Amino acid sequence: MKSILIILLTFFMNLPSSWQQHNIDLIRSAIPKQLPVKRAGVDSSGSIRIINGSSLKRLPNVIRDLSLALRESPFHEGLLLDEIGFSIYLYDVTCNSSEISAAIMYKANDTVYDLKLSRFNQMATDKALATTLIHEIMHCVLLDISKRIRSDDKQTFANIISSGLNKNIDPSFSNYDFLFMMNSANDGQHELMYRFFFPHMVSLLESFSKIHKQGFFDPADAEILMWSGLQKTSGYKKLSDDEKIEIESTILEAKGINK
């Protein structure tokens, strides 16, 4: 099955764009929606599965090592995901601006998230690609949490609050506050991402870099990169102007963008 999908993806990615979207939908429909992927020696329940349909040449190795890092992270635990977990399907899109690295497309009650990757990512370093994927995965985690809260799963929010990830969450924070911020477009989701997950996103990037054999010389560099996309959050606004300048220049350099 896997080899057939790879052949189909290679073929369809070489078709004109008008055909690509139609055939992306066909391939996507073949992705299992409910059954978790079985891996020898690893509990695949509640896992995040990444399916690559992108033509970016260095992406397969990045996905491989990021998936390994994810298995050892809190984002693989049942507290954050349900028993099924979810899949993320990656594919290429052409964007007019290099400021847009990726975007998540999601249909209600689905267990597959479509991650559109800008072709500008071909200029990015492996660490920058991993940073982008981690950021987008967090959007998926938040959407998955939101879906369960909306379905009146009362234990979901309690589990997340008790998971120890909420270092920047006020004790009075509630289901209502979470859903209100989720409905506030990207800015609201980015604020939730910062408040709930930021230190663990940084740790995940550090773990990836070690597995990928491209470790950070300075531990602060992983945090600098992980601010990518979170520049409108309350945490970022508290940083000094010098810190913001260093963050912006580091992110642009890692993404291969000359400003």
Image: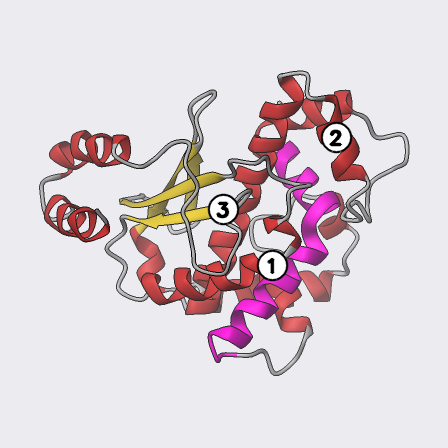
Is 178 magenta? The answer is no
Please say if 37 is above or below 113. below
- The x, y position of residue 15, in whole percent, is 9, 43
N-terminal of the pair, mark 2 or mark 3, is: 3
Report the mark closest to the observer, 1 or 3.
Answer: 3
Residue density around tag 2, few if under 14, some if 14–19, many if 20 or more, within 10 Å: some
- The x, y position of residue 50, in whole percent, is 40, 49
Which image quarter is the C terminus in?
bottom left
As shown in the figure, which amino acid type bears the numbered disc 1? Answer: Met
- The residue where tag 1 is placed is 226
Local SS, label 1:
helix
As shown in the figure, which amino acid type bears the numbered disc 3? Answer: Ile
- The x, y position of residue 234, in whole percent, is 75, 44
- The x, y position of residue 200, in whole percent, is 68, 56
The residue positioned 56% from the left and 55% from the top of the image is 228
Please say if 150 is above or below 119. above
- The residue where tag 2 is placed is 157
N-terminal of the pair, mark 2 or mark 1, is: 2
As shown in the figure, which amino acid type bears the numbered disc 2? Answer: Phe
The residue positioned 68% from the left and 27% from the top of the image is 181
In depth, the one of 121 and 22 nearer the eye is 22
Q: Which mark is residue 48?
A: 3
What residue span does the magenta drawing correspond to? 187-214
Colouring method of the image: secondary structure
